[in-house]
Image: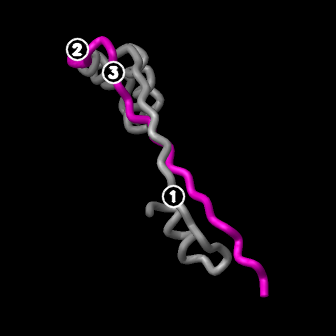
Amino acid sequence: MQWPGTELQRSEWFADVQQSVIERRLTMSARDYVGHLSTISAYLELPTFEQEQVYSRIMQVLPEAVEVAADITVHLARRRCEQ
């Protein structure tokens, strides 16, 4: 169980906490994948010149199509009845 499920389990307000993973696999072009990377803060924090170098290097080693794991983790919990 990962957060926030662990927090729900510890809470006196919730019971029957469940976690499910919805598996999603996406395929995108190398260009689209680098576009996705350009939205991530670790890359955005780099100076513009370094960003361009990094994206160029990544493009050189990627295949034409990139498979991305985009799984979604969901939690379900029931609120305990007040007594």
Q: Can you give x and y, in whole percent of width and height, for residue 30 in the image? A: 34, 16
Q: Quadrant of the C terminus?
A: bottom right
Local secondary structure at mark 1:
strand
**Disc number at residue 60?**
2
Locate residue 5 relative to residue 66 in the image: left or right: right
Q: Which mark is residue 55?
A: none
Between discs 1 and 2, the one toward the N terminus: 1
Q: Which residue is mark 1?
A: 19
Query: Disc 1 marks which amino acid?
Result: Gln
Residue on which disc 3 sits:
66
**How was this image coloured?**
one colour
Q: Amino acid at mark 2?
A: Gln
Check the image and report above or below for 22 versus 30. Answer: below
* Category of crowding for the residue at label 2, using alpha-carbon neighbours closer than 10 angstroms: few (below 14), some (14–19), many (at least 20): few
Quarter of the figure with residue 1: bottom left
Viewer-side label of 2, 3 = 3
Q: Which residues are magenta?
A: 60-83
The residue furthest right is 83
The residue at the point 43 percent across, 26 percent down is: 26
Q: Which amino acid type is shown beneath numbered disc 3?
A: Val
Separation (CA) of disc 1 from disc 2: 39 Å
Q: Residue furthest bottom?
A: 83
Where is residue 76? Give x, y as percent: 61, 59
Q: Are marks 1 and 2 in contact (CB under 8 Å)?
A: no
Mark closer to the chain start, 1 or 3: 1
x and y, in percent, of residue 59 in the image: 28, 16
